[in-house]
Amino acid sequence: ADLRVAVLGVGLMGSYHAQALATRVKGVTVTVINDFFEPKAQEVAAAIPGARVVTDPIEAINAEDVDAVVIATPGKAHEDQVRACLQRGIPVLCEKPLTTDIASAYQLVQDELATGRTLIQVGFMRRFDAEYVQLRELIASGGLGNPLIVHCTHRNPDVPPHFDSEMMIRDSVVHEVDAVRFLLDEEITAVSVLKPTPTSSAPAGFHDPMIVILETESGRIATDEIFVRTGVAYEVRTEVVGEKGTATIGLDQNLIRTGTDGRWGGQISPGFVQRFDGAYHTELQRWADAARRGTVDGPGAWDGYAAVAVCEAGAEAVRTGQRVEVAMAKRS
Ligand code: ISE
């Protein structure tokens, strides 16, 4: 039988997931749609045969015709909703951030441990992108020798006006935080942030771009250029520098080369939905396949907690201009 899924929060990401689950992911029926803005939930549900609207998110999680849940509500709502999934004992795919503070993220790690099952997956979709997977395998197989430095670039063409420096850390850099942990297989222990001259399109007082420096347990360094108002396109690149060589991904991802008027040129993917479409699809299909067996298949509660802890340090580094150590428990 199909896995019956509730999608909570149908903004940009949630409506994309709901559509993908309903039309492209095999073995899934979307039965319940929820959003705090009911007309939006109605609109999304109307386009999905068999889906109905449930206005209360906790009721949606506990509905009889729901076997698993996708959460794409605002970060502040995640803690209670993920906990309700744990209490019911059903798998959940929660968009990042897992929660909005370190203590609640750690509590969810503990709550999941207490169930004796693995039920929480966090939406770090880059782990499902073919290039990231290959780069991780190359590093793990020793192909680059010891990896010493990771250089990341993360550029968005634009963001909403309220997207401030702290959001740049918590919403955008969070992906490099997870990618670096994924590629190097170790924790990040300290964060520093450099604030170059801001672009003139950034509102006063916003630091855009920034250079974020991540230090790892073993002493490696990762840099991340985060620039969210380039006016150009969505550009995400990673280069790993090892003792025996270097490797770069994201150079011409989704580049469409065109030839017109005796010239050649290309189009860069405009946004993350286009750039990571394949990754999202793999993420959803593997999650759904695992959920049918009562578990998940991807980054979990610990990864969500680690990302929250590193971003907390990053937000403090933006505010204070200091190098901030990550406050994180040892993994039990
Ligand atoms: C957004 O929230 C995301 O999650 C995207 O993946 C990221 O690239 C973007 O910068 C964020 O705004």
Image (spheres, rainbow, N blue to C red):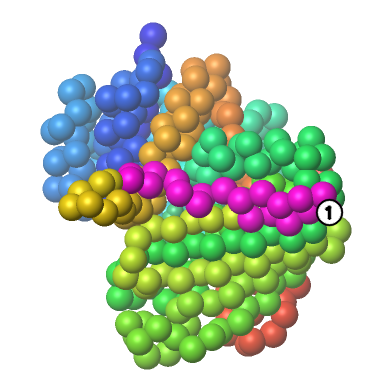
Is 249 a magenta residue? yes
Q: Is residue 175 above or below residue 201?
A: above
- Residue 233, how many percent across, how many down? 35, 61
Q: Residue at x 39, y 9 (%)?
A: 1
Please count the marks in the image.
1
- Residue that label 1 marks: 243
219 on left or right of 118: right
Ligand 1, seen in the image, is in the quarter at bottom left
Give the position of the C terminus as an image quadrant: top right
Q: Is residue 122 above or below residue 165?
A: above
Q: Is residue 134 above or below residue 76?
A: above
Q: Residue at x 48, y 77 (%)?
A: 209
Q: Which residues are magenta?
A: 239-257
- Neighbours of disc 1 within 10 Å: few (<14), some (14-19), many (20+): few
219 on left or right of 17: right
Q: Is residue 245 above or below residue 219?
A: above
Which of the 4 quarters of the picture holds residue 29? top left
Is 12 a magenta residue? no
Q: Residue at x 82, y 49 (%)?
A: 244
Q: Which element is circle 1 on?
A: loop
Is residue 267 visible to us here? Answer: no
